[in-house]
Amino acid sequence: MIYFFPILIMVLGMVGGQSFKFARRYGIPTFALTIKSFGQTKSKKRKTWLLFLLLISPLLSLGYGENSKLMKWIGSDWLVRIVYGFLLGLPFLVWNIWYAPIVLACAWSVRAGSLGTFKIGKKSYDILVEDMVRYFSLGVIISLI
C-alpha cells in the first residue's frame, strides 16, 4: 500500500486543482494522517501527525493560481509557484526533511502540457503533467515522514 501512497496523493491533488478543492485542501492531509498513523499506538507519533495536519492544510488552501493571495502579493506567476512550493515544504522541516522546500519549489516551478482530457458528465478534465509532478513529489515527501 505504501508504494501507491504518492500516486493517491497525486490523484487527490489533481482532482483538487480542477474542481473539488476540498480534495487538495483537506483530502491530502486527512488521507496522509489516516494511512501514516494506521496501526501506530504511540501518542507522540499521533501528535506529530496532528501537527502535520494543522500545518499543511492552511498551505494547501493558500493556492497559487491567478486569483490567489500569493499572486496578489507577488504578482509574477513563476515566482508565485516557486514561493508556494517552498512554503509547502517548510512543515517538513519538523521531521528534519531539510530538502523538502527545495524539492517542492522545483516541482511547483515545472510548466508542462496536458496528456489529454476526459469528460465526466458535462465537465471536462485535463491530465496535467505539471500537476502530476507537483503532487507526486509531495506524496513522496509525505511518505518519508
Image (cartoon, rainbow, N blue to C red):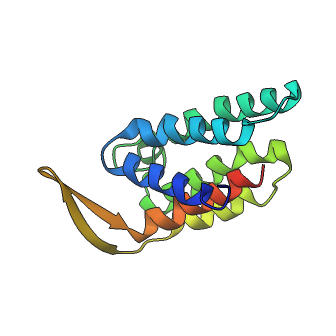
| Residue 70 in sight in this render | yes
Where's residue 129, x and y in %? Answer: 42, 71
Q: Residue at 79% of width from left, 29% of height from top?
A: 46
Where's residue 33, x and y in %? Answer: 66, 36
Q: Residue at 53% of width from left, 61% of height from top?
A: 134
The answer to whether 49 is drawn above or below residue 3 in the figure is: above
Query: Is 42 on the left or on the right of 136, as rendered?
Result: right
The front one of 58 and 37 is 37
Query: Is 73 on the left or on the right of 90, as rendered?
Result: left
| Residue 62 in sight in this render | no
Q: Residue at 58% of width from left, 34% of height from top?
A: 30
Where's residue 81, x and y in %? Answer: 50, 57
The front one of 62 and 69 is 62
* Residue 127, quarter of picture: bottom left
The answer to whether 13 is drawn above or below residue 62 in the figure is: below
The answer to whether 41 is drawn above or below residue 68 in the figure is: above
The front one of 120 and 110 is 120
* Residue 1, quarter of picture: bottom right
Query: Is 39 on the left or on the right of 16, as rendered?
Result: right
Where's residue 19, x and y in %? Answer: 30, 45
Numbered label tally: 0
Q: Residue at 72% of width from left, 28% of height from top?
A: 50
